[in-house]
Image (cartoon, rainbow, N blue to C red):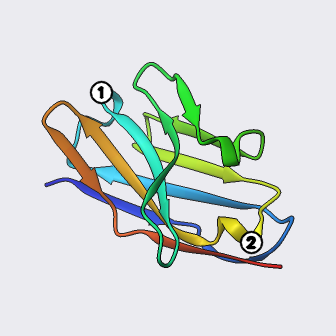
Amino acid sequence: QVQLVESGGGLVQAGGSLRLSCAASGIIFSAGAMSWYRQAPGKQRELVAAIRSDGGTNYADSVKGRFIISRDNAKNTVYLQMDSLKAEDTAVYYCNYWVVHLSSWGRGTQVTVSS
């Protein structure tokens, strides 16, 4: 059974930092692409950052230069380091695991940035 558990969210002032973690189980972690998405109230879920099984990454334009995604295959964990946070980064952040024929989601962690 696939399980993704996010942690590390919270309340932070604008300009601050947070590090999100997503621990995975029940999957061949190293084989999949891992991504972070976010969904703000009244908005659609959007891709924030992704890291492929080969370590290649891509980011939404809105977070380039501020966020870094990384993965530790030995710990079955993906991270999102978020620096220089802005009020518009406020959202529920979800991690996603993807391989062909399987896409799984965590339950999300709330990030609130006060201005």
Residue occupying image coordinates x 56% and y 48%: 79
Q: Eyeballing the image, is 17 above or below 41?
A: above
Up/down of 63 relative to 42, above or below: above
Mark 1 nearby-residue class (10 Å; few <14, some 14–19, many ≥20): some
In the shown orientation, is residue 43 left or right of residue 27?
A: right
Residue 66 shows which numbered tag? none
Left or right, 27 with reference to 50: left
Image location (x, y in percent) of residue 42: 47, 77
Amino acid residing under circle 1: Ala
Tell me the SS state at disc 2.
helix
Number of numbered discs: 2
Residue drawn where x is 66% and y is 65% of the image:
89
Residue assigned mark 1: 31
- Of the residues shown, which amino acid type is indicated by label 2? Ala
Q: Judging from the image, what secondary structure is the residue with disc 1 in?
A: helix
Viewer-side label of 2, 1: 2
In the image, taking residue 49 as reference, residue 105 lies left or right, namely left
Label 2 vs 1, first from the N-terminus: 1
Viewer-side residue, 96 vs 38: 38
Residue at the spot of label 2: 87
Indicate the quadrant containing the N terminus: top left, top right, bottom left or bottom right: bottom left
Q: In which quarter of the image is residue 17?
A: bottom right
Residue beneath the point at 60% across and 42% down = 60
x then y, percent, for residue 22 = 45, 55
Give the camera-side residue of 24 and 93.
93
Question: Which quadrant of the figure has residue 64?
Answer: top right
Quadrant including the C terminus: bottom right
Where is residue 111 drawn, in percent x and y? 61, 72
Q: Quadrant of residue 114?
A: bottom right
Whole-percent x, y for residue 44 in the image: 42, 64
